[in-house]
Amino acid sequence: MSEDRKKNVVVIGEDDEPIATLLRDSINDEDGYQAVVVSDGALVLETVRQVHADLLILDIMMPGLNGFEVFDRVRADTDIRNMPVLFVSAATTQFQEEFAQRGIKDVISKPFDLNDLLDRVRVLCPSDAGGKS
């Protein structure tokens, strides 16, 4: 049995369990998306490579590596350098300078509107599940 289309894989680097679960379940409910949660920053990169992620959603504050450290390593890795990264954090104003230095524009502040977040996921990582190619 062959799969008609590959689902877009979204890795969620988030250690706040209720938020991680909400994100995962919401993204999995979207046609053409499959979400995986990783709660430790140090494991995010490994997971991204293993599942061939199409999009990475990152919190800033995580155990292991923080979101910026993960982002820097993604951009330094030729295999995954071009993968879109979306930051979701309660501390976005506190880290304006870090975002600016890295040219990070895809940032959503917590608490977030789930529909806004899902819209951003669709924009950064369009799925062909809607029949459009």
Image: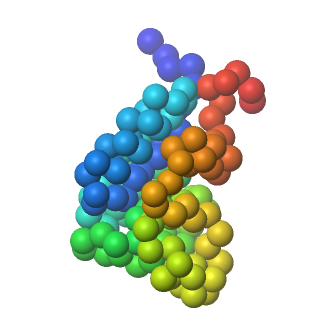
Does residue 100 appear left or right of residue 66 in this picture? right
Q: Residue furthest top?
A: 1
Q: Quadrant of the C terminus?
A: top right
Does residue 125 appear left or right of residue 11 in this picture? right
Does residue 21 appear left or right of residue 11 in this picture? left
Please name whichever residue, 75 or 78, is drawn nearer the observer in this view of the structure.
75
Q: Quadrant of the N terminus?
A: top left
Question: Hey, which quadrant is residue 103 in on the image?
Answer: bottom right
Q: Is residue 22 above or below residue 57?
A: above
Q: Residue at x 44, y 36 (%)?
A: 26
Does residue 55 show up? yes
At which x and y percent is residue 131? 70, 21
Q: Is residue 121 above or below residue 133?
A: below
Does residue 42 show up? no
At which x and y percent is residue 7? 51, 32
Q: Is residue 127 above or below residue 18?
A: above
Q: Residue at x 25, y 73 (%)?
A: 64
- Colouring convention used in this rendered image of the protein: rainbow
Q: How many marks?
A: 0
Q: Residue at x 63, y 35 (%)?
A: 127
At which x and y percent is residue 18? 28, 48
Please name whichever residue, 122 or 74, is drawn nearer the observer in this view of the structure.
122
At which x and y percent is residue 105? 65, 69
Q: Residue furthest right?
A: 133
Please name whichever residue, 118 or 57, is drawn nearer the observer in this view of the structure.
118
Q: Residue at x 57, y 87 (%)?
A: 97
Q: Is residue 104 above or below residue 100?
A: above
